Amino acid sequence: MGNIGFRIRKHFERVDPVIVKEFQGIATANIGDVMGRLWAMDHTIKPIGQRGIHLVGSAFTVRTHPSDNLLVHKAMDLAQPGDVIVIDAFGDMGNAILGEIMCHYAKTKGISGYVVDGPVRDIEGIAKMGFPVFSKGVSPRGPYKEGPGEINMTISCGNVPVEPGDLIVGDGDGVMVVPKEEAAIVLEKAKAQERQEGAIIQSIYEGKWDRSWVDDCLNQKGCTILD
């Protein structure tokens, strides 16, 4: 594929919609725990002005110049319902990559949300409409529409590689990237993690949570405890 830096790929493999639906409501913390505590985007990628948000969908990737959103507009036209548009703007904080109008359009297209390694704007309007947007921050300075950029190539967002079609899960703790070929097994493990944590919480309130492991671990590591 030629013309590197200014190219668009239309077709790629997505995660099975049944698996995507099963990830609804699963906490990113539990997903992270079963993925070696890796594959979490940098803490600076946060939900914009909303609480209780939960985002799930297949990644529709965009790499754009830090001050430009021409390729983001094209991505909105190409993305399928349920996709999450994940934007690599190199973490630059100079120009907002998108705002409220683009969120309204994405919502009508059935797009699940945005994840932006860069700033957005119109956060009050975005919060009111309840559309999931995760970004590195905000800026009132708008973008240009000149290009170049790429759609549906491998990108980096929040210091994590993202392939087109990878599963994106976001909540108040942040954003996880699940490689699409691992989605089914990660789902199984994350559900088991949720069940395990539920059992621990129940044991806490029953006064049965075994805490002996703490001292066992300290002893194994050679910690000295003084009276």
Image: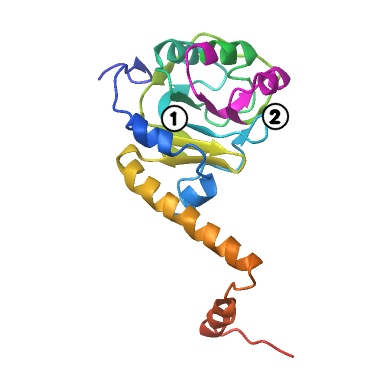
| Between discs 1 and 2, the one toward the N terminus | 2
Residue depicted at x 56% and y 34%: 54
What amino acid is labelled 2 in the image?
A: Gly
Toward which corner of the image does residue 164 lie, by quadrant?
Answer: top left
Residue depicted at x 49% and y 53%: 194
Q: Is residue 163 visible?
A: no
Q: Secondary structure at mark 2?
A: loop
Q: How many marks?
A: 2
Measured as percent of width and height from the top left, residue 103 is found at 58, 16
**Other-residue count near label 2 (Cα within 10 Å), few / some / many at <14 / 14–19 / ≥20:** some
Specify whether 31 is left or right of 153. Answer: right
Is 123 above or below relative to 201? above
Query: Which residue is tagged 2?
Result: 49
Query: Magenta residues, as a range?
Result: 107-135
Q: Which mark is residue 57?
A: 1
Residue depicted at x 70% and y 17%: 125
Specify whether 136 is left or right of 169. Answer: right
Q: Which mark is residue 161?
A: none
- Disc 1 versus disc 2: distance between alpha carbons? 20 Å
Report the residue that reaches farthest toward the left: 1
Q: Secondary structure at mark 1?
A: strand
What amino acid is labelled 1 in the image?
A: Gly
Residue depicted at x 60% and y 22%: 131
In this rendered view, identify the residue nearer to me: 165 or 197: 197
